[in-house]
Image (spheres, helix red, strand yellow):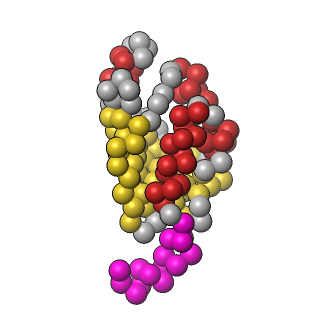
Amino acid sequence: MSKKFQKKCFLTCLVNKKEVIEKWVATFDEANAGKLAAFYADDAINHQVVSEPVIGKAAIQNYFEQGFAEAKMVCIIENIFEEGEWAILEWKDPLGLRGCGFFHIMNDKIVFQRGYWDKLSFLRLHGLS
């Protein structure tokens, strides 16, 4: 790791990103949108590429509330990778859906998340299409 990167990363890389993601997944599986929103910075962005970005902790909580009301969602961790301020989650669910998420984490909070998954498959698997 370069000295420039080490200096930039000093405050924001002290947290174990893998542990943050493991706790995020456990909370996601509880379907508790309020607790899940606590993982995000106040001005965080959650961009699931199948929809428009959701901006702000309150909007992210609302997004999860709607999602949990629509379908029983379970996230099974396949891999977690971390590098600096970033963590990557590769996941599957019990119905066969797979995806991945990229999390930018600073000072214990998710400031940006981008997720890739197949919305049509999700809708079909949950009988929503």
Q: Is residue 103 above or below residue 47?
A: below
Q: Residue at x 43, y 40 (%)?
A: 48
Relative to residue 9, is residue 91 drawn left or right?
left
Q: Quadrant of the C terminus?
A: top left
> Residue 98, image x and y in percent?
32, 34
Residue nearer the viewer, 112 or 3: 3
Relative to residue 101, is residue 7 drawn left or right?
right
Would residue 102 be counted in the magenta stretch?
A: no
Q: Is residue 96 visible?
A: yes
Instruction: Report the number of discs.
Output: 0
> From this viewpoint, which residue is outermost toward the bottom?
3
What is the quadrant of residue 99 in the picture?
A: top left
Would residue 5 be counted in the magenta stretch?
A: yes
Q: Is residue 126 above or below residue 86?
A: above
Q: Residue at x 46, y 57 (%)?
A: 18
> Residue 33, image x and y in percent?
63, 35
Q: Residue at x 35, y 49 (%)?
A: 79
Q: Is residue 86 above or below residue 7?
A: above
Magenta-colored span:
1-15
> Residue 62, image x and y in percent?
63, 34
> Residue 7, image x and y in percent?
48, 83
Q: Quadrant of the N terminus?
A: bottom left
Residue nearer the viewer, 5 or 45: 5
Q: Is residue 49 visible?
A: no
Q: Residue at x 51, y 56 (%)?
A: 19
